[in-house]
């Protein structure tokens, strides 16, 4: 390494990999991963969120995590988005494709994708 | 894409409670479950809560698992990593509040961490110390880059001076001033930067944890110091009893060299610096700076008179700065965040934070870091979780064999350099040993003095002979053969040793005796005059007696007594012949009726 730029490049590349350990994202995306969720296909949804959030450089303030059964098994895979100072948004019957749209429009654009939410299903 | 990090502590404490096997089992189980692409297992340095090890933390949720065993691993993987349900029975969620919390709490909300401020330990338990990239992700080596490209050596020294940083081991000398003294001289003078990692106080493991958890911070700081004083060579003197620390240091130095952060022409600025690791054989005296330098030079580790101070004439006769591990660990952040930031933490004359190794009669044995000036009571009760088994706090020893004790009446003393010195103790390197009502203070003084007598290098008479004479008096007192005037004799010897010993360790060796006399003189007097140990510790002063009211005359004790000191008629009370009794306590353990007591 011969320059500060190289050092900064390593830092930026690595930052996204350790930021997970700070676990203090202002926005939390929680994927239901109990038996019901997994059976309904929650894992591809979880992985899609992790990938998209990283791709869009949102890791600084968005934490993707999992939880057990939320209690509405017929709607699985269920994803809840918690934002500081805002009402929680519950997405149901999620897929990896839908996850991409939620990242794009909700997490990045700030506008929940209402057609995927629990009220509309 | 990795969604979860499982951090497994790889500090010495958790390693000895089997964390490497747990990490291996975790990796295997994750592989078997097909989660390798999603979950990463990371080995880190010490989290601090050594008493509850092995420790594991799962991010991003921050679930804190304590006392994990290999058998627990499949359950954690299936329940938590796969299904998102933390394994409740292993979750540590003690927030220190009265009401119990259900489920996991984040690490920073636990009682143990809530009142801590981790600067020197900021990366310990967060990054993998064997991966330089993780250190760089935490702004590692940015301070070195800034210093080399934007600052003059004088500006660096002025910044460290302004921060108010004082040495984190021993006397608390201002670090910036030390650097300033070494910075002068003819241009081109050969100079050295040395790191004192010879942590020898009984019960202290602060420096070991920094080296194990964040070795690059020390390397980066040494390079900064070298630039500031104009040195190009550094030595880290670490004891061979710290195998994990030595291994990680060597890995870190190798990686830094590979990245060109050590070696020639660092960052293309023309600045050269490299580090050699020297292993010590574990002599306590080698923690004394001049003895340490003598040992690096290849000679027998013995101190030499000061002045000349190392900053003027140190290693191989050249100007040398020598700081300890924790002092260095603070430097990169001071450079990046500024002197004002650092001096806003702590109290008037003691800036920043201090790491303590909590040990003895305390619930949370481990490593804590608090702002300077935090009351001792906060460290012991809020962070340390108080004294086990509902016992009463009696005293805390700070500064190891060079320090003194702080009695219960002074438990609200702010922990900073000057407050501790004022009450006859000292900050020292940061060992903090807690004692409860079952500890005899004369015995504690004897313990520390035994240590100094064993470790005295023998070069100067006051330490070699004086501490031994003091120990003989203490042994006499605890054997029940103390005489009137022994306390005064101890005080007089202590005064002579303090003023005449060659090095800092000799000069401070009498401190544990002096401070226990100061605060617990009545205990010394009880030993000498009444031949009684109030805490029932000193075996030779113990007196075992049989209560005739409770004794059933079963003869069990007399049959177990190894010296035949107990006699009597079956079904009538037995008696102990005090002249034959060797105070072994076997009778006490044998009696089923609670008829035997120890006075």
Image: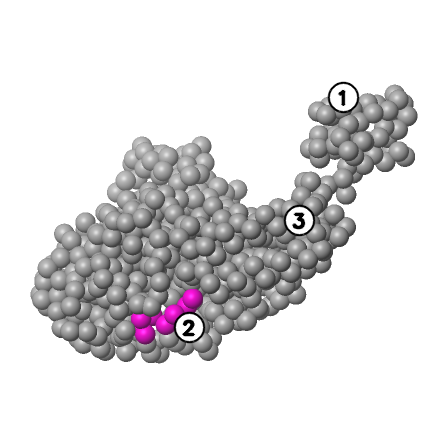
Label 2 CA crowd tier, 10 Å (few <14, some 14–19, many 20+)? many
The CA span between labels 2 and 3 is 42 Å
Task: Look at the image and tell me whether residue B204 can be seen.
Answer: no
Q: What chain does badge 3 belong to?
A: B
Q: Which residue is mark 1?
A: B559
Q: What chain does badge 1 belong to?
A: B
The residue under the point 85% across, 28% down is B574
Q: Find numbered disc 3 in the image and state the secondary structure of the residue it sits on.
A: helix
In the image, residue B460 above or below residue B183: above
The residue under the point 39% across, 40% down is B15
Dot 1 or dot 2: first in sequence order is 2
Same subunit, labels 1 and 2: the answer reads: yes
Q: Check residue B477 in the rendering and tell me which mark sits there, or answer none.
A: 3
- Residue B575 screen position, x and y as percent: 84, 30
Q: Nearer the viewer, mark 3 or mark 1?
A: 3
Q: What chain does badge 2 belong to?
A: B
- Residue B435 screen position, x and y as percent: 60, 53
């Amino acid at each position: 390494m011969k320059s500060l730029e190289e050092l900064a490049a390593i830092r930026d590349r690595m930052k996204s990999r350790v930021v997970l350990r700070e676990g203090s994202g202002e926005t939390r995306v929680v994927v239901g991963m109990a038996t019901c969720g997994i059976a309904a296909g929650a894992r591809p949804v979880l992985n899609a969120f992790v990938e998209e959030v990283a791709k869009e450089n949102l890791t600084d303030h968005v934490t993707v995590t999992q939880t057990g059964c939320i209690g509405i098994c017929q709607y699985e895979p269920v994803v809840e988005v918690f934002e500081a100072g805002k009402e929680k948004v519950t997405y149901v019957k999620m897929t990896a494709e839908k996850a991409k749209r939620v990242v794009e429009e909700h997490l990045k654009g700030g506008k929940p994708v209402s057609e995927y939410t629990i009220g509309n299903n | 894409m990795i969604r979860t990090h499982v951090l497994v502590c790889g500090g010495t404490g958790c390693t000895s409670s089997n964390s490497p096997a747990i990490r291996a089992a975790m990796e295997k189980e994750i592989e078997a479950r097909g989660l390798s692409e999603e979950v990463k297992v990371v080995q880190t340095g010490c989290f601090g809560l050594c008493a509850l090890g092995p420790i594991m933390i799962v991010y991003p949720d921050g679930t804190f698992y304590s006392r994990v065993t290999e058998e627990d691993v499949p359950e954690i993987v299936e329940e938590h990593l796969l299904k998102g349900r933390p394994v409740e029975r292993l979750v540590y969620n003690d927030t220190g509040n009265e009401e119990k919390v259900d489920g996991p709490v984040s690490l920073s909300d636990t009682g143990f961490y809530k009142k801590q401020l981790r600067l020197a330990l900021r990366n310990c338990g967060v990054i993998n110390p064997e991966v330089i990239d993780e250190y760089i992700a935490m702004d590692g080596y940015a301070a070195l880059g800034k210093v080399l490209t934007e600052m003059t050596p004088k500006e660096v020294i002025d910044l460290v001076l302004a921060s108010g940083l004082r040495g984190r081991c021993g006397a608390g000398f201002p670090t910036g001033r030390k650097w300033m003294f070494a910075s002068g001289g003819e241009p081109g003078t050969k100079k050295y930067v040395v790191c004192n990692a010879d942590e020898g106080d009984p019960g202290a493991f602060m420096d070991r944890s920094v080296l194990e958890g964040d070795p690059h911070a020390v390397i980066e700081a040494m390079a900064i110091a070298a630039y500031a004083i104009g040195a190009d060579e550094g030595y880290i003197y670490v004891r061979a009893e710290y195998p994990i620390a030595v291994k990680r240091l060597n890995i870190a130095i190798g990686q830094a060299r590979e990245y060109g952060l050590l070696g020639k022409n660092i960052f293309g600025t023309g600045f050269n610096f490299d580090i050699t690791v020297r292993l010590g054989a574990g002599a306590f005296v080698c923690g004394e700076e001049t003895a340490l330098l003598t040992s690096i030079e290849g000679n027998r580790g013995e101190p030499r008179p000061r002045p000349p101070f190392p900053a003027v004439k140190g290693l191989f006769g050249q100007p040398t700065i020598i700081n300890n591990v924790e002092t260095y660990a603070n430097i990169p952040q001071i450079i990046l965040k500024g002197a004002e930031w650092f001096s806003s933490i702590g109290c008037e004359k003691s800036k920043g934070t201090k790491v303590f190794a909590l040990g003895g009669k305390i619930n949370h044995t481990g490593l804590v870091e608090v702002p300077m000036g935090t009351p001792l009571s906060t460290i012991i009760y809020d962070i340390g979780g108080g004294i086990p088994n509902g016992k009463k706090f009696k005293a805390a020893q700070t500064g190891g064999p060079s320090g003194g004790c702080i009695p219960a009446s002074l438990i609200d003393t702010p922990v900073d350099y000057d407050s501790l010195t004022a009450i006859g103790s000292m900050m020292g390197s940061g060992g903090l040993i807690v004692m409860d009502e079952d500890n005899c203070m004369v015995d504690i003084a004897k313990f520390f003095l035994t240590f100094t007598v064993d470790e005295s290098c023998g070069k100067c008479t006051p330490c070699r002979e004086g501490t031994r004479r003091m120990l003989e008096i203490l042994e006499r007192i605890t054997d029940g053969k103390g005489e009137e005037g022994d306390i005064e004799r101890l005080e007089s010897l202590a005064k002579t040793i303090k003023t005449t010993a060659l090095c800092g360790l000799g000069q401070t060796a009498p401190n544990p005796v002096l401070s226990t006399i100061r605060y617990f003189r009545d205990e010394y007097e009880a030993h000498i005059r009444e031949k009684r140990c109030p805490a029932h510790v000193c075996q030779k002063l113990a007196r075992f007696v049989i209560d005739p009211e409770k004794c059933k005359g079963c003869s069990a004790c007399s049959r177990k007594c190894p010296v035949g000191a107990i006699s009597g008629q079956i079904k009538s009370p037995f008696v102990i012949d005090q002249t034959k009794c060797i105070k072994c306590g076997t009778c006490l353990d044998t009696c089923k009726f609670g008829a035997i007591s120890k006075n």
